[in-house]
Image (cartoon, helix red, strand yellow):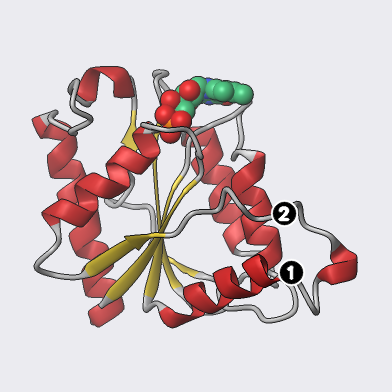
Amino acid sequence: MKVAAIAGSIRENSYNTLLLETIKERFSEKFDLDIIKIDKLPLFNQAEELDPPEVVKSFKNQIADYDAVLISTPEYNWSVPGVLKNSLDWLSRGERPMIGKPVMVVGASISLMGTLRAQMDLRRILSAPGISANVLEPAQNEVLITQAHEKFDKNGKLTDEATLKVVDRAVNSFYEMVNG
Ligand code: FNR
């Protein structure tokens, strides 16, 4: 199983990227995970949707090649960051590699809400017709990391045991969903 992982933050040392790196390391015997960067994608332009710039074509081809997609989103102003929505808008038009793709949603924020509102919006976006992803059900599988600054150590490792248990259970469900 090959998983494409997208972080909704392009910040260096982003907690969401660190979460993806944690999952990559913990599940390295079960699947390969590659972090696919979205920081070089231009702003979506509908006039280019059928013949997008090379960087977009290659992003869409990359996503198409993977068995599944894992998205880790921060919450910006009660929703998903624009940079993440931009990448999903490109994926939703012309060639549409997300249709039917197994997707798991996770997220980390420094607040007490742990990206709840962003994840709810993201799930709604992922069910739009042009995306129509096969999203892992949230029941028992939600990964909402609150107060991220207290759960990752100085080296960027997720060390909070209770959080790691939640992550492991949810990612195992995702693995079973993709392989079951
Ligand atoms: C935030 N942050 C934030 N947090 C939250 O829980 N709800 C929110 O609505 C917002 N809004 C918001 C807007 C903007 C523009 C920024 C820059 C930040 C805080 C945010 O969750 C925190 O900075 C995370 O650490 C960002 O994720 P990364 O970059 O660490 O992955």
The residue located at (35%, 32%) in the rendering is 15
Position of 146 relative to 34 (above/below): above
The kind of residue tagged 2 is: Pro
Residue 5: % across, % down: 39, 58
Residue sitting nearer the eye, 12 or 23: 12
* Image position of 17 (left or right of 54): left
Residue 99 is situated, as x and y percent measured from the top left of the image, at: 57, 78
Residue drawn 55% across the image and 53% down it: 38
- Residue 151, labelled with which disc? none
Give the quadrant of the N terminus.
bottom left
Percent across and percent down for residue 63 are 49, 73
Counting residues from the N terminus, which is met first, the one under dot 1 or under dot 2?
2
* Helix, strand or loop at mark 2: loop
Question: Is label 1's Cβ within 8 Å of ligand 1?
Answer: no
Residue 42 tag number? 2
Q: Is residue 109 left or right of residue 49?
A: left
Residue holding disc 1? 53
Circle 1 packing at 10 Å, graded few (<14), some (14-19), many (20+), is few
Task: Check the image and report above or below for 120 versus 93.
Answer: above
- x then y, percent, for residue 19: 29, 42
Q: Is residue 114 visible?
A: no
User: Based on the displayed image, in which of its 4 quarters is residue 135 positioned?
Assistant: bottom left
| Residue contact at pointers 1 and 2, CB within 8 angstroms | yes
